[in-house]
Image (cartoon, grey):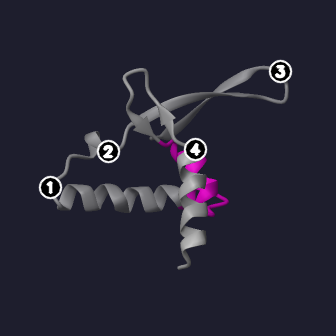
Amino acid sequence: MKTEAIHSLTSMFEGHAQLTESGIELWLARDLQYLLGYSEWRNLLKVVSKAKTTCEVSGHPTSKHFVDVNKMVGLGSGGSARLRTLC
């Protein structure tokens, strides 16, 4: 892969990083879904499930790497709904 492409991808992912109040950097899976080219959430969930299994098999607790979170999103009707995601 060309250096330019690597820098572009790195910037794109870093641009979607979020920081907690304590300074922990994280990415929401729903944001990564589109960056990784998954048009459907259920397809990304299959990959996340495999990643969790890999963590467990290698002796790393998934709780340190994957957290279920809820994100409020606006609805077309003007209301809002809680959207379940991972980070």
Mark 3 closeness class: few <14, some 14–19, many ≥20 residues within 10 Å: few
The answer for how far apart the CA atoms under marks 2 and 4 are is 17 Å
Which of labels 1 and 4 is toward the front? Answer: 4
Q: In the rendered view, tell whether residue 28 sits above or below residue 3.
A: above
- Residue 42, percent from left and from top: 56, 56
Q: Amino acid at mark 1?
A: Gly
Which of labels 4 and 3 is toward the front? Answer: 4
Which of labels 2 and 4 is toward the front? Answer: 4
Contact, CB < 8 Å: mark 1 with mark 2?
no
Q: Which residues are magenta?
A: 27-43
In primary-sequence order, the first of circles 3 and 2 is 2
Circle 3: element type: loop
In primary-sequence order, the first of circles 1 and 3 is 1
Left or right of 67: which side holds 80?
A: right
The answer for how far apart the CA atoms under marks 3 and 2 are is 34 Å
The answer for how far apart the CA atoms under marks 1 and 4 are is 28 Å
Q: Quadrant of the C terminus?
A: top left
Which of labels 1 and 3 is toward the front? Answer: 1
The answer for how far apart the CA atoms under marks 4 and 3 are is 26 Å
Q: Which residue is mark 2?
A: 65
Q: Which residue is mark 1?
A: 59
Left or right of 60: which side holds 27?
A: right
Q: Amino acid at mark 2?
A: His
Q: Which residue is mark 4?
A: 16
At 84% from the left and 30% from the top, the residue drawn is 76
In primary-sequence order, the first of circles 1 and 2 is 1
Q: Amino acid at mark 4?
A: His
